[in-house]
C-alpha cells in the first residue's frame, strides 16, 4: 500500500512531500491542480 509508510508520520513539523520522499522513496517532480470559484449553497455555507 502506498500510504502504509506514512501511517506513523508526525506531520507537526514536516510536509507530506518530505515524508513521502523519506519514508517511501517517492519524489514528486510535477503536478497539476484545478481551482475554481463556487457559490455555496445555504447548507454548505452553514456546514463549512
Image (cartoon, grey):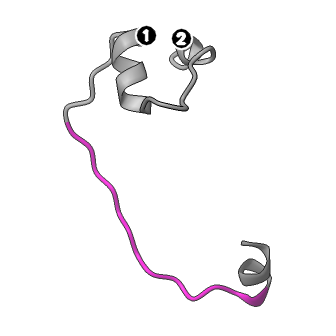
Residue on which the image places disc 1: 23
Is 34 inside the magenta-drawn segment? yes
The correct choice, above or below, for 35 with respect to 22 in the image is: below
Q: Give the dominant element type of the magenta stretch: helix, strand or loop.
A: loop
- Residue found at x 38% / y 68%: 35
| Region in magenta | 30-42
Residue lying at 55% horizontally and 32% vertically, measured from the top left: 12
Residue ranking furthest to the front: 13
Residue extending farthest left: 29
Picture quadrant of residue 30: top left
Mark 1 Cα within 10 Å, few/some/many (few <14, many 20+)?
some
Specify few, some or many for label 2: CA neighbours under 10 Å numbering under 14, 14-19, or 20 or more: some
Residue 46 as seen in the image, left or right of residue 10:
right
Can you tell which quarter of the image residue 18 is in?
Answer: top left
Quick one: SS at disc 2?
helix
Q: Is residue 33 above or below residue 29?
A: below
Confirm or deny contact between disc 2 and disc 1 (CB under 8 A).
Answer: yes
Residue 4, horizontal then vertical, whole percent: 58, 13
Taking 47 as reference, is 35 left or right?
left
Query: Residue 5 vs residue 35: left or right?
Result: right
Is 7 magenta? The answer is no
Q: In this picture, is 28 found above or below 22? A: below
Q: Residue at x 62, y 17 (%)?
A: 7
Q: How far apart in space, not on screen, are marks 2 and 1 (Cα)?
A: 6 Å
How many numbered discs sit on the rendered protein?
Answer: 2
User: Element at badge 1?
Assistant: helix
Residue under circle 2? 5
- Residue at the spot 33% in from the left edge and 56% down from the top edge: 33
Amino acid at each position: 500500500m502506498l500510504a502504509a509508510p506514512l501511517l506513523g508520520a508526525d506531520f507537526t513539523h514536516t510536509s507530506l512531500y518530505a515524508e513521502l520522499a523519506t519514508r517511501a522513496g517517492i519524489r514528486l517532480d510535477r503536478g497539476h491542480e484545478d481551482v475554481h470559484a463556487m457559490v455555496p449553497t445555504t447548507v454548505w455555507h452553514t456546514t463549512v
